[in-house]
Amino acid sequence: MSDEALLLERLTGIRRRIAAACDRAGRDPASVALMAVSKGHPASAVSTLAGIGQTLFGESKVQEAKAKIPGCPAVARWHMIGHLQTNKARDAVRLFSMIQSVDSLRLAQEIDAAAEKAAKTMPILLEVNVAGESSKFGYSPEKVLAEFMAINALRRLEIHGLMTIAPWGPATEKARAVFRRLAELRRRCEGVLGAPLPVLSMGMSGDFETAIEEGATLVRVGTSLFGERVYTRTGGVDEDP
């Protein structure tokens, strides 16, 4: 089977699973966007997917994105989904159409300053470490609420919603509880804002169907779509994201 045929088969299967999860939840499949997490995979794979209709991609490292994006079709749209250091804010604003991993007021301020210099409005998501895992970045739910309006006041940023990563592992119901808590937190943030937040980015290769059942509007799928990532001598590549 050719690489294109394999990617098409995987993409079709994932879209079917998204549709089935939406059917179980009484949702329109069009309400869930699929992001292809391309970190650790070459521009050629991105180009193949873009050619068969998958145009939303996610990267976790600014340096990898800087090297990869110029070799990809212009139709591809890119989101930053990994931890972002403040000194990479300028590059992130230039490369991405959304930054999903805003996890502090200081980072938000740096992105806002970079967006001001670029004369660009930057859509963002606030990353929440719902489960309180020490190995993960992200706001605590309480701090999101405490800093929400300060971030919302930044002139060049637009808060579109929230993002989370559930604990890794086969315990689906543990992930479900995390997704349910993020959906509830979004409702609380909407109450503070007085306006809707349209994006709930949650769910990856192992749990995206559960995330959809709990209200995800964007799921981030890497391994199930691209296959296993390449590991190098300089370090491994994380699960999506």
Image: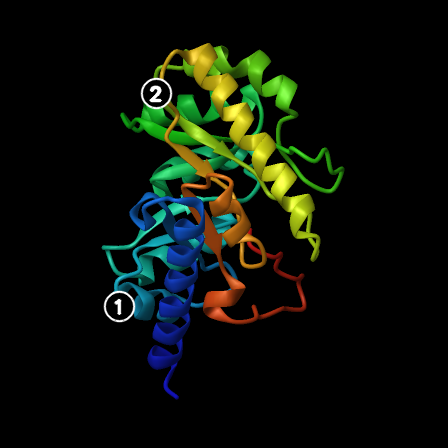
Q: Identify which residue, 72 or 142, lies in the foreground.
A: 142
Q: Residue furthest right?
A: 134
Q: Which mark is on residue 189?
A: none
Q: Secondary structure at mark 2?
A: loop
The amino acid on which the numbered mark 2 sits, given as a three-letter code, is: Arg
Q: Quadrant of the N terminus?
A: bottom left
For this view, does 135 lie left or right of residue 7? right
Q: Residue at x 34, y 78 (%)?
A: 4
Residue 50: quadrant of the picture: bottom left
Quick one: 35 or 61, which is closer to the camera? 35
Above or below, 201 against 126 in this view is: below
Residue 166 seen in this snapshot: no
Please tell me whether residue 78 is drawn above or below residue 16 in the rendered image: above
Circle 2 residue: 156
Residue in front for this viewpoint, 148 or 112: 148
Name which residue type carries label 1: Ile
Q: Nearer the viewer, mark 1 or mark 2?
A: 1
Q: Is residue 193 above or below residue 204?
A: above
Marked residue nearer the N-terminal end (1 or 2): 1
> Left or right: 177 with respect to 202?
right
Q: Is residue 77 visible?
A: yes
Tell me the tag on residue 52.
1
Give the spatial CA distance, label 1 vs label 2.
34 Å
Judge the density around disc 2: few (<14), some (14-19), many (≥20) Cα neighbours within 10 Å.
Answer: many
Which sits in the foreground, 144 or 14?
Answer: 14
Instruction: Tell me where residue 165 appears, x and y as whole percent.
Output: 60, 43
Residue 168 locus on image (x, y percent): 68, 52
